[in-house]
Image (cartoon, rainbow, N blue to C red):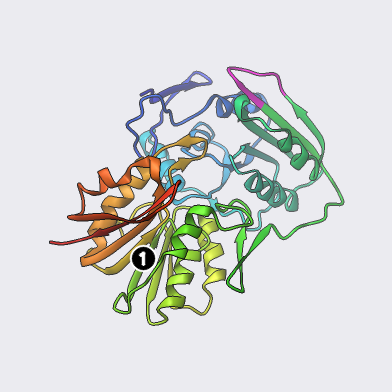
Amino acid sequence: MDTTVKINSKTYQLQRYPKTFDKSLRAWSNAELLVLDYITDKNVESLHLFNDRFGVWNCALQHKKITTVWTYASQQKAIRQNLKLNNFSTEVDFKTPIDDLQYVEVALIKIPKSLELFELFLQQIHKASHKETVVVCGFMTKYFSPSYIKVAEQYFEEVTQSKAWKKARLLILKAPKKEVQKKKLVNTIQWKGKVLQQYYGVFSSGSIDIGTQFFLENLEVKTEELKVLDVASGNGIIAYEVANQNPQAAVTLLDDFNLAIESSKINLEGKKAEFLCDDTLENIKENSFDLIVSNPPFHFEHENNIEVALNLFKGVENCLKNEGRFLLVANSHLNYSTHLTTLFTSVSVLQQNKKFQIIECIKKR
């Protein structure tokens, strides 16, 4: 795995977090390097960084005044890890996508997979923009969509595209529009008479994904399951249903994505709920939950990657009580049962259809 990159004659060490065994993956992309090349000769002192997933921009631009808009807890850890690896300060000015920003001079965006999240970034930038604001967006050409341009043109008068370099391109946005109708970038979802809300960019825009629907249709919470954890909780719909089935239960929601956690806070208002934005269960007390539920992720932006889910399963086993249950829904082709049998003494498929399985794991020691 390549962990060394040279940028403007300087060499940096960059490692992925979480660690991966896929040697083809790096902690940077050519799109990010192309963005850095574009701004090299620009007289810029203040920068706002968006979707700097592993910290290549934070490292290469650490001599500038930087504000980093973070979306994932794992992203914060990756950035600090790589700053430390290169002997830079790990103090970072972090903001979330729903924070108000101060004066934006230049913003750098690695365009995310979610078009909605891209729009959320642009609206946040536009609110803090002035006539000289420039936004430099990098993407790999294989992921290009004309919708990138359509969204950008809602907020900027000038939207130009660069030539390709090593299968990467830039969108350069200039001249923020004076009159922009600000939208509340929140989707609403109907569920059993309840209107759920979730910020743009949260998984399954505007509807409950079919895997979660299958899980909810077959979910039965036991009366004695009073401490419940929802791992990769998304907008909180599974935890919401748990709380409805057992009003005495206290639910904890954990998700790597900060906008998912903020969405679930809205949806579980008034419930006995705790919210954690984290990518691991390392900070949760062992043997502390009666029931753990999950629709675990197997995508990492454009990558299919089950390593994150497999690491979560290890954490689940650790914080589940003896005789406690772990219920999850998963695509049948992922064959999670094979991995789960190495952690749990009892693993069984409770329900399945053509696409999904609901798996029950019992912890016995």
Q: Main secondary structure of the magenta part?
A: loop
Residue found at the very far left of the displayed protein: 365
The picture places residue 116, in percent across and down from the top left corner, at 65, 48
Q: Nearer the viewer, residue 140 or 13?
A: 140
Any magenta on residue 168?
yes
The segment highlighted magenta reads 162-169
Q: Secondary structure at mark 1?
A: strand
Vertical placement of residue 351 versus 81, above or below: below
Q: What's the residue at 68%, 30% (across, down)?
A: 43
Instruction: Please report the residue visible at 20 percent of the width from the left and 54 percent of the height from the top.
Output: 344
Residue highlighted by disc 1? 229
Q: Dividing the image into 4 quarters, which one contains the C terminus? A: bottom left
Lateral position of residue 240 relative to residue 365, left or right: right
Query: Residue 45: percent from the left, percent from the top?
Result: 64, 37
Q: Is residue 309 left or right of residue 157?
A: left
**344 over 42 or under it: above or below:** below
Name the spot of residue 297 as percent of width and height, x first.
Answer: 43, 48
The quarter of the image holding the N terminus is top left
Q: Is residue 210 magenta?
A: no
Report the residue at 50% width, 59% height from top. 213
Q: Where is 325 relative to 177, above or below?
A: below
236 lies above or below 43: below
| Residue type of the residue flagged with mark 1 | Leu
Whether residue 284 is visible to the viewer of this picture, yes or no, is no
Q: Quadrant of residue 232?
A: bottom left
Residue 122 seen anywhere in this rendered image of the structure: yes
- In which image quadrant can residue 40 be found? top right
Q: In the image, residue 198 lies at what x, y percent?
A: 60, 61
Tell me the residue at 71%/50% (across/down): 103
